[in-house]
Image (cartoon, rainbow, N blue to C red):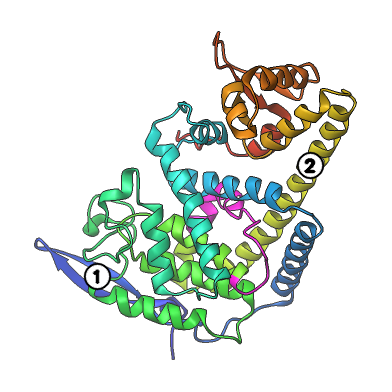
């Protein structure tokens, strides 16, 4: 009879440079013995389902989903990258996207920008009918590490050497994933699991995330790809029509609990504890995303009505207001290029928006001053301050 401590996998003795250590080989999913979902867990899972449905319904009612998508994708990219140690904030990302210098090392912002490109690529592939597969996972990883710090760590390729988590080498590491020769078979089993039809969607996403992190198939970027996998599963299974959810806010807020639950699955076979934590996270994330989206939509509509009161200048100001929803930090020259107008015309519109306190000038430049859609960015920026290690 299998012990609960062996439920998630088994250890394999390995050695390198005369040092012995144990690697962990996860058992194929789903777990055995079968999951024991109690009434409390089931209730939380059902609430999470309802919350996701409401979030997706909110987006479905909009004539243009791009506003919510713009907010959600960037927030998830920032938060997931921050969990891995990047110091980029939303303002840094927006400055980078406006071809302005961010306040942190460029590589930090590049990692966030890569994450956005990886999400967009994954969604494009899913919409074309391409399934979640090892090929798609490698493609996403290649984009994620295409520029910045990870570009020399085999982007798009499964590792061919041993990695570890914590410590300075496998012998003193907190956790050592499967040896490189086992990675392909473990990932192949995970791919088969992703195509099973009899697993509840949230449960599938929860189990797949832990399994991916346990295999740790890449030399770098495993945490970010593993969290992105959650979003892709929800979209591939039609629980979400767009990648609206930023689950990484919950994982960042409860970072130590997140790591502890992953570890308890491996050491104690505690899949049920992880599932409850995951369901609660999805529920909280869905409600948080929906509330933030409503706040943004409300702000944009109120500001639009205020701009309409300007009279004749409202025509240009409204066009500029629409642009600010996709480029919340902008200068008059950039705005002129984007809108096909003259610089003086855009500069005048910016003055109108500044008088209405919709935008704020936040540089001391004499020329090419930058303006920020202040309240809009504050809503987007909530809870995205970088993690400061004590």
Check disc 1 and report the residue beneath it.
180
- At 43% across and 87% down in the image, what residue appears? 2
Check disc 2 and report the residue beneath it.
295
- Where are the magenta residues, as a range? 236-260
Q: Quadrant of residue 141?
A: bottom left
Tell me the crowding category of disc 1: few under 14, some 14 to 19, or many 20 or more residues within 10 angstroms, Cα based.
Answer: some
Quadrant for the C terminus, please: top left
Q: Is residue 222 magenta?
A: no
Locate residue 103 relative to residue 383 in the image: left or right.
left
- Of all residues, the one furthest to the left in this rendering is 18
Name which of mark 1 and mark 2 comes first in the sequence: 1
- At 46% across and 26% down in the image, what residue appears? 103
Which type of secondary structure does the marked residue at label 1 adopt?
Answer: helix
384 or 171: which is nearer to us? Answer: 384
Quadrant for the N terminus, please: bottom left
Residue 181 is situated, as x and y percent measured from the top left of the image, at 23, 75
* 165 over 274 or under it: above or below: above
Q: Quadrant of residue 214?
A: bottom left
């Amino acid at each position: 009879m299998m012990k609960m401590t062996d439920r998630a996998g088994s250890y394999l003795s390995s050695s390198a440079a005369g040092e012995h250590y144990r690697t962990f080989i996860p058992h194929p999913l789903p777990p055995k013995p079968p999951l024991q979902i109690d009434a409390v867990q089931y209730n939380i899972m059902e609430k999470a389902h309802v919350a996701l449905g409401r979030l997706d319904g909110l987006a479905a009612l909009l004539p243009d989903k791009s506003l919510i998508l713009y907010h959600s994708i960037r927030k998830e990219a920032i938060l997931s990258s921050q969990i891995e140690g990047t110091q980029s904030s939303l303002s840094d990302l927006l400055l980078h996207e406006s071809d302005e210098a961010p306040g942190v090392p460029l590589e930090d912002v590049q990692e966030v920008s890569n994450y956005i490109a990886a999400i967009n690529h994954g969604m494009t592939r899913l919409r074309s009918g391409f399934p979640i597969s090892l090929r798609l996972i490698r493609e996403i990883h290649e984009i994620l590490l295409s520029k910045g710090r990870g570009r020399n760590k085999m982007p798009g390729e499964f590792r061919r050497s041993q990695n570890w988590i914590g410590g300075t080498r496998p012998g003193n590491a907190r956790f050592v994933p499967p040896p490189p020769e086992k990675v392909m078979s473990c990932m192949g089993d995970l791919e088969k699991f992703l195509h099973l039809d009899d697993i509840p969607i949230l449960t599938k996403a929860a189990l797949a995330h832990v399994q991916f992190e346990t295999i740790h198939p890449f030399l770098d970027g495993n945490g970010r790809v593993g969290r992105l996998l959650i979003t892709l599963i929800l979209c591939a299974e039609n629980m979400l029509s767009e990648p609206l959810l930023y689950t990484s806010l919950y994982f960042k807020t409860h970072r130590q609990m997140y790591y502890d639950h992953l570890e308890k699955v491996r050491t104690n076979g505690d899949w049920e504890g992880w599932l409850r934590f995951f369901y609660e996270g999805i529920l909280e994330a869905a409600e948080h995303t929906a509330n933030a989206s409503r706040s943004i939509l409300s702000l944009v509509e109120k500001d639009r009505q205020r701009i309409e009161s300007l009279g004749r200048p409202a025509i240009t100001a409204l066009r500029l207001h629409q642009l600010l929803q996709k480029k919340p930090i902008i200068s008059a020259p950039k705005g002129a290029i984007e809108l096909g107008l003259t610089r003086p015309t855009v500069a005048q519109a910016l003055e109108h928006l500044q008088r209405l306190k919709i935008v704020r000038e936040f540089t001391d430049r004499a020329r090419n001053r930058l303006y920020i859609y202040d309240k809009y960015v504050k809503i987007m920026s909530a809870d995205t301050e970088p993690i400061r290690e004590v």
